[in-house]
Image: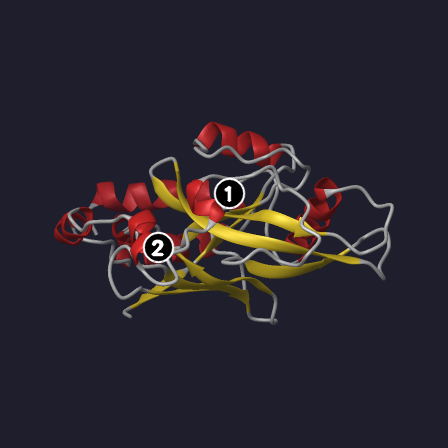
Amino acid sequence: MPKNTHTAAKEAARILADDEGIGYAEARRIIERWNAHQVPTAEELAAADDLPYDPVLHYAVTPPSEIPGWVMSTEDYPMRVDGPSPYCYAHKVQSLAHREQSATLSLYARPSIYGPEPSLIVQPFTFAPPAETRIPGYGHWGNCWTVELHDAGFRYNRVSHLAAPGWSATVTRGADPSAPCGLRIAHVDGYVLFDDDTPLPPDWLARTRAHPEGVPVFAGPGAGLPIPAQLDKEEADLMLATADMIAARIPFTVREA
């Protein structure tokens, strides 16, 4: 190993050890594994960038020709008393204050970026509260949800450099680049964050191998503050610091249709 490469690996391991609170020897093994990681090639990225992508048109021309509301725009988490919203993943959340009560969040997943990396945001489109309760609205249930995720290994405050233990995401491509992909994000202990269809751009999918530990996945809001439609890194870091979001880095596997 050339001296400059050896020195760079030592420095990278030192920084990783400090950032993640792990020993230097473990950090050095991780850095060596990262150095062996195969990132997408320039040719792969260029080919993905050239693919047409128009999910709105796909939904419009494909029976039943319905465009999910969250594809067009987001709402401020309105209450829905007649059950989960269509084209969403229904996730039941138990109240932390009243364990006998639960609400259903209608979750959707949307691609985003975090600095130079692809990222994913999972958030509610609507929520269905218990039939009879004095518990507040979405802010309460969002907090309960993100506490669940914290218990399962997600983090407030920052995006880790390392994959969250036990978590994985599997994408099954749609029949064409604009078709929704199957997306399942789950923990080995059985906790499922998301398991439904969602449009994911080909260029975004091609970049899920950019980081050897996976893709930052954000969930929220946890304290009621809506997530902006366009979320830049500074806003993301602020929302993590205020517990309005929670995040985990999760390895993605992309399969063909």
Relative placement, left or right, of 40 versus 34 is left
Please, is residue 192 above or below residue 208 in the view?
Answer: below
Mark 1 vs mark 2, foreground winner is 2
Residue drawn at the location 48% of the way across and 28% of the way down: 234
Between 92 and 190, the residue placed more toward the observer is: 92
Which comes before the other along the chain, label 1 or label 2?
2
In the rendered image, the quadrant that contains the C terminus is bottom left
Residue drawn at the location 46% of the way across and 55% of the way down: 25
- The amino acid pointed to by label 2 is Tyr
**Number of other residues with Cα within 10 Å of mark 2, as a class: few under 14, some 14 to 19, many 20 or more:** some
Residue underneath mark 1: 159
**Within the image, what quadrant is residue 214 found in?**
bottom left
Colour logic: secondary structure
Please, is residue 249 above or below residue 76 in the view?
Answer: below
In 3D space, how far apart are the residues under numbered discs 1 and 2 (Cα atoms)?
33 Å
Cβ atoms under marks 1 and 2 closer than 8 Å: no
Between 158 and 123, the residue placed more toward the observer is: 123
Residue 196 coordinates in the image, percent (x, y): 48, 63
